[in-house]
């Protein structure tokens, strides 16, 4: 497949100021007439050829200025039309089969309704069009269809007219006054009911809000509606952004490739980010609904009003919008806990990407298939990069920068460079060298050494940015590190400072320390880097107990465990040092369990052990079996050592009644964390408590937590609870997804066998990405299953990719990175992982999506 390069960008030769689309809807055949007003772009290359992208569609008719055109041809999937003048009217007819569209891109059928997904290149599967984000058009849409089958007809913007047709049909016309690229087009038709509310903007505009779901689901939309209203208000207060239409529709669909989509005025969501009630959604699910509703709403400005010039600029809208949704969620709940959660996601999902064969800068230089670049790097590292600018500028000056960005580029298709320049000008920062964060891949490795002489402490820092595919030479980048030095006796620091390491090596001095201080570095995770600062356990225990930055406190706890487990798997611990390490960890855990000043949400966070993937990241080559065994052994030791404290904590939490307030949510969090450790130390006691928690549960958080623990135990209660859960929630797709995931993510020795059996369960289907992910992403993310010593886990994921690719290539490609980690795994497993990739590569026909990921992974 051809490689598309950022440096080859050319402005479009033709613009399309207006489009009108006419859909005659049918589940098996939808007929589309598209009318484009095209004008020559003065900034284009002057070619007479109009290139209209297509993908698996055929032109049924092509008319230019009202006459049947002969002067057109196909170039691969694209339609080329020769034009003589400066402006023309082009009319094209196409027909598509939504029911047969298993890729879920373009127009497709889901649960009896019709809906669209056009980002990134789905619009070309509906009609021929310059399907690129820098061609902005105003859209008028007419749709007609059977009224009984499609009682609700929705598109972007406002409904301008509707009426009845013949033979039980009806029609609606929609107009969106805001020019937009084709990827933001949307249409939905189906049997839907709405939760309705209104919001009055700061400028006094009354906006109708609707959350559309299948009849019967409307009672589960209140949290989504409250989150939407909170998002609208927060964006006005925090970024000065006001909504710009009289109507905002959200539709929940069951079949969706990603989480949600920000189509102008008509967001389409996977049901899991809309529906929530205590009986079926965990506290984590509630948070995810709030975060994704916010994210898509915030795109109305960061993405829609200011869009991307080309897909290499994806982080312009995604990185910025992730930062906005993170700040929003932090403001709605606990800032400290949110920061810890966001960093955990970055470390588990993005750090491995940045150190593997698929590493790319947040603004990639080339791609074969853009769908492969909706990555943790573009989204989450992209957010961290913008967060660093905010840290350096401070929130007020950063806001001046974002105001300037929106003012300068409203209505435009912009670049990452435009964003950086606006922050530079608005916030008054020099970001010259900082731009390297956009072009260099790889997680910077920072080493720190603290020395002390007289009353001066000196912090010496070095940085290296590791080589990544296609980038062997790297330059030092500005790394803003929030640091504080603690006086060991007073238990306090002398004020936090921001040091910016912008050279390969530098040092910073701090005066007034009679004794060697304790360093707290990268507080709040001010930079997305890995810090190598070996320290004695006593210092980590000190910070875990005293640091006034909650993230740094968490980091100290994690550091204690990471140092110990890395030493253990590297064979560097003898009996005495193992006992010493465990004693330090045990003491820190005991302090966390008992600390009166900690709220339970934070306590629950501090109780979570570092993930196996994060531990693997600390080693050049890792043995997943050894990491798993050592981590489980530590869990069991903690569970035994702290048995009485953990039982007391579990009992205390059990007594707290269900509510959505922070105290009750915290109680639920520690309840399950305590159960995990109790079960590790004493499986029989764990099973007894988990089963009791399961039976007494009046909410999904407790029920799922208990079932998760039971699913990993070899106890009779396991089968009983799993069967009950399936019976209780039969027909509720989102909860049945949990049932699949819990089993595939479990710890038992038979998990692979169970996953294989589940793939044959009548509720399993390969055509619903949620279900596929529920079973197989959980298995691929379960080290015990995926890295089974006999290679069966690799074989299972390889087989899945081969079977899924012809059905849904985008989803299939998302499973490749797990196999692509082979270079960092011990040689026996690495050979089997590689073999699996080769078997995929040898398939006679593969999608561009999977082909790109596999080739790069083998590379
Ligand atoms: N901007 C949206 C991206 C998206 C997407 C991309 C490829 C294939 C399907 C997709 N569905 C949604 C989601 C977001 O970041 O808000
Ligand atoms: Zn987004």
Image: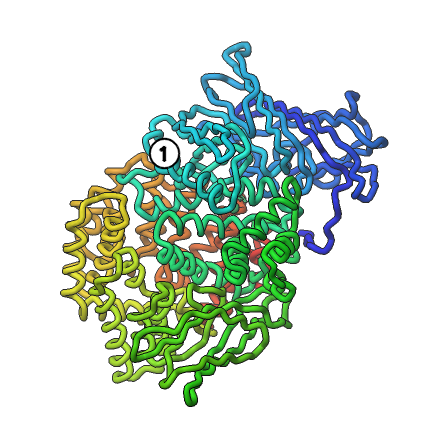
- Residue 87 shown left or right of residue 834 in the figure: right
- In this view, the residue in front, 570 or 545, is 545
Q: Where is residue 794 in the image (x, y as percent from the top left)?
A: 44, 59
Q: Position of residue 593 (x, y in %)?
A: 22, 64
Q: In which quarter of the image is the C terminus?
A: bottom right
**Which quadrant of the figure has residue 631?**
bottom left
> Is 515 drawn above or below residue 362 in the view shown?
below
> Is 276 drawn above or below residue 692 in the view shown?
above
Residue receiving disc 1: 221
- In this view, the residue in front, 71 or 163, is 163
- Residue 782 shown left or right of residue 448 in the figure: left
Residue displayed at 65% across by 51% down? 415
At label 1, counting other C-alpha atoms closer than 10 Å, the crowd grade (few under 14, some 14-19, many 20 or more) is many
- Using the rendered image of the protein, determine whether residue 760 is visible from the camera's viewpoint: yes
Q: Position of residue 46 (x, y in %)?
A: 83, 41
- Residue 689 shown left or right of residue 55 in the figure: left
Residue displayed at 40% across by 58% down? 339
As helix, strand or loop, the secondary structure at mark 1 comes to loop
- Using the rendered image of the protein, determine whether residue 839 is visible from the camera's viewpoint: no
- In this view, the residue in front, 540 or 859, is 540
- In this view, the residue in front, 300 or 174, is 300
């Amino acid at each position: 497949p051809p490689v598309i390069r950022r440096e080859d960008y050319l402005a479009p030769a033709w613009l399309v100021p207006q489009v009108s689309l006419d859909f005659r809807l049918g589940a098996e055949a939808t007929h589309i007439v598209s009318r484009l007003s095209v004008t020559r772009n003065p900034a284009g290359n002057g070619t007479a050829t109009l290139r209209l992208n297509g993908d698996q569609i055929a032109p049924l008719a092509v008319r230019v200025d009202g006459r049947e055109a002969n002067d057109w041809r196909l170039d691969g999937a694209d339609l080329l039309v020769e034009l003589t003048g400066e402006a023309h009217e082009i009319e094209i007819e196409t027909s598509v089969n939504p029911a047969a569209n298993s890729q879920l891109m373009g127009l497709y059928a889901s649960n009896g309704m019709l809906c669209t997904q056009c980002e990134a290149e789905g619009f070309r599967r509906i009609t021929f069009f310059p399907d690129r984000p820098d061609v902005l058009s105003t859209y008028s849409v007419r749709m007609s269809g059977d009224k009984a089958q499609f009682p609700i007809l929705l598109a972007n913007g406002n409904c301008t007219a509707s009426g009845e047709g013949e033979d039980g049909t009806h029609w609606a016309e929609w107009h969106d006054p805001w020019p937009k690229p084709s990827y933001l087009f949307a249409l939905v038709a189906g049997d839907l009911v709405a939760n309705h509310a209104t919001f009055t903007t700061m400028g006094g505009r009354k906006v109708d809000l609707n959350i559309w779901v299948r009849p019967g689901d409307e009672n589960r939309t209140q949290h989504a509606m409250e989150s939407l209203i909170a998002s609208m208000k927060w964006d006005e207060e925090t970024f000065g952004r006001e909504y710009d239409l009289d109507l905002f529709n959200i539709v929940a669909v069951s079949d969706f490739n990603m989480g949600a989509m920000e189509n102008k005025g008509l967001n389409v969501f996977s049901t899991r980010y809309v529906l929530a009630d205590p009986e079926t959604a965990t506290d984590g699910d509630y948070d995810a609904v709030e975060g994704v509703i916010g994210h898509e709403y915030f795109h109305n400005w960061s993405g829609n009003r200011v869009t991307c010039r080309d897909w290499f600029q994806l982080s312009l809208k995604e990185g910025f919008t992730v930062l906005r949704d993170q700040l929003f969620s932090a403001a709605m709940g606990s800032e400290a806990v949110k920061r810890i959660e966001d960093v955990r996601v970055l470390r588990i999902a993005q750090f491995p990407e940045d150190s593997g064969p698929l590493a790319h800068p947040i603004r990639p230089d080339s791609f074969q298939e853009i769908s492969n670049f909706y990555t943790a790097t573009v989204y989450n590292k992209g957010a961290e990069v913008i967060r660093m600018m905010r840290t350096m500028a401070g929130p007020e000056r950063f806001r001046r920068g974002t105001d300037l960005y929106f003012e300068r580029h409203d209505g435009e298709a912009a670049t990452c460079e435009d964003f950086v320049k606006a922050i530079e000008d608005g916030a008054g920062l020099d970001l010259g060298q900082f731009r390297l964060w956009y072009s260099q891949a790889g997680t910077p490795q920072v080493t720190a050494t603290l020395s002390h002489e007289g009353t001066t402490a000196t912090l010496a820092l070095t940085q290296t940015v590791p080589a990544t595919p296609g980038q062997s030479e790297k330059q030092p980048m500005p790394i803003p590190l929030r640091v504080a030095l603690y006086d060991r006796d007073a238990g306090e620091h002398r004020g936090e400072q921001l040091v910016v390491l912008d050279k390969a090596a530098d040092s910073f001095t701090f005066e007034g320390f009679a004794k060697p201080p304790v360093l707290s570095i990268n507080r709040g995770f001010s930079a997305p880097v890995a810090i190598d600062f070996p320290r004695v356990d006593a210092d980590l225990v000190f910070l875990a107990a005293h640091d006034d930055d909650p993230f740094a406190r968490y980091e100290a706890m994690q550091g204690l465990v990471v140092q110990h487990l890395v030493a253990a798997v590297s064979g560097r611990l003898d009996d005495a040092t193992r006992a010493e390490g465990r004693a330090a960890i045990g003491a820190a855990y005991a302090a966390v369990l008992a600390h009166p000043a900690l709220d339970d949400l934070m306590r629950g966070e501090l109780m979570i052990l570092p993930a196996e993937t994060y531990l693997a990241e600390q080693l050049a080559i890792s043995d997943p079996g050894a990491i798993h065994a050592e981590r489980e052994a530590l869990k069991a030791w903690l569970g035994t050592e702290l048995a009485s404290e953990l039982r007391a904590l579990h009992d205390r939490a059990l007594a707290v009644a269900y509510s959505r307030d922070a105290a009750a949510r915290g109680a639920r969090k520690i309840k399950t964390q305590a159960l995990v450790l109790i079960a590790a130390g004493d499986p029989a006691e764990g099973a007894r408590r988990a089963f009791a928690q399961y039976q007494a549960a009046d909410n999904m958080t407790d029920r799922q937590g208990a079932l998760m623990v039971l699913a990993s135990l070899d106890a009779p209660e396991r089968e009983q609870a799993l069967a009950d859960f399936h019976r209780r929630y039969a027909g509720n797709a989102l909860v049945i997804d949990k049932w699949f995931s819990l089993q595939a993510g479990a710890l038992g020795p038979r998990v692979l066998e169970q996953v294989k059996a589940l793939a044959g369960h009548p509720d399993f289907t390969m055509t619903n990405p949620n279900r596929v992910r529920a079973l197989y992403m959980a298995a691929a993310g379960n080290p015990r299953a995926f890295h089974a010593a006999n290679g069966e886990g690799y074989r299972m994921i390889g087989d899945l990719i081969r079977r899924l690719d012809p059905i849904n290539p985008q989803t299939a490609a998302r499973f490749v990175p797990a196999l692509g980690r082979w270079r960092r795994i011990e040689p026996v497993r690495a050979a089997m992982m590689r073999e699996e990739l080769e078997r995929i590569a040898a398939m006679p026909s593969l999608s561009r999506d999977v082909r790109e990921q596999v080739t790069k992974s083998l590379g």
